[in-house]
Image (cartoon, grey):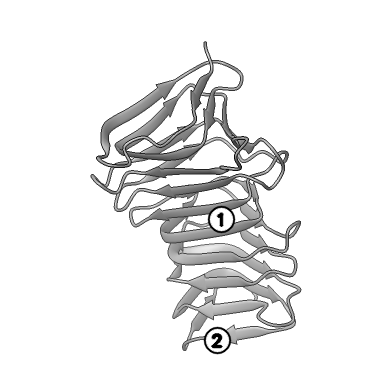
Amino acid sequence: SGLVVIQNNIGSTTPIGDFSITSTNASGLSLMGTIQAKSFTTVSTPSIVLATLSGGISDATINTTSANGNITLVGQIKGTTDYTENLTLNSGSGTIFYSGNFSTTPRVKNLSITSTSGFTLPAATDVASFLLSGAGSLSQDTTITTANQNGAINFNATLNQTYNLTLLSGNGTITLGGIIGEPSLNDVTLTSTSSSNGVILNTSAISAASFSVNSSKTVLQKAVTITTSGST
């Protein structure tokens, strides 16, 4: 039931083997620095708190690309100070499984996720900026917002499952890449108030029950086919 605190890099020269953390402490895991391991798992962890050292280090990275291992996170992910700490997850061809939610306060700053095998998105994510590369899936209706910080949302990934997807970026830019909707998503809504590059479509195919863009400017970077089974 003790608190687990990681305040430095682990496996930076040579990645370690499978790394598993178990704690029932209310604060669970306090994390900063870079962890490079074959796989990474938290078990029965109520919270994963991204911390900042007095010297200003505020980034947490979990990297399992050396063995393309899985990353499994259990518990609420939150920062120490609102929109200050960054989180990067990179599993190569391993999967990233997250069972929990992102705290509404204090919120994570920049969230970057890379997995070619897939990452299941939580129902609600409120961060300063969001990047998903590789593949993603929805297990429920999902909303990602960066509107409070006017940050960018980048989906450079194949995204599937029949649920609603809502992206809100405020004055930030929303970029869609990869194949969106295999199988078809339900209702997809993109909202950006940016007058320069509100929504950028860098994908060849979008398939959904409905597809709605609320933006003063939409940029097509390649030919795209949008297929809807309901209304457009």
Does residue 138 sit above or below 81 in this rendering? below
Depth check: give the residue in front, 109 or 144: 109
Quarter location, residue 16? top left
> Residue 222 location in percent, x, y?
47, 87
Whichever of labels 2 and 1 marks the residue nearer the N terminus, that label is: 1
Which amino acid type is marked by label 2?
A: Leu
> Residue 76 location in percent, x, y?
59, 33
In terms of secondary structure, where does tag 2 sit?
Answer: strand
Q: Which mark is residue 163?
A: 1
Q: Residue at x 66, y 38 (%)?
A: 103
Q: Residue 230: in sight, yes or no?
A: no
Q: Residue at x 62, y 58 (%)?
A: 129
Please name the residue that numbered disc 2 is placed on.
220
Direction from residue 13 to residue 86 in the image, left or right = right
> Residue 186 location in percent, x, y?
57, 62
Direction from residue 44 to residue 83 in the image, left or right = right
In terms of secondary structure, where does tag 1 sit?
Answer: loop
Quarter location, residue 101? top right
Camera-near label (2 vs 1) is: 2
Does residue 214 sit above or below 41 in this rendering? below
> Residue 65 location in percent, x, y?
29, 49
Graded by Cα atoms within 10 Å as few (under 14), some (14 to 19) or many (20 or more), the crowding at tag 1 reads: some
Which amino acid type is marked by label 1?
A: Tyr
User: Gap between marks 2 and 1, in whole Å?
Assistant: 25 Å
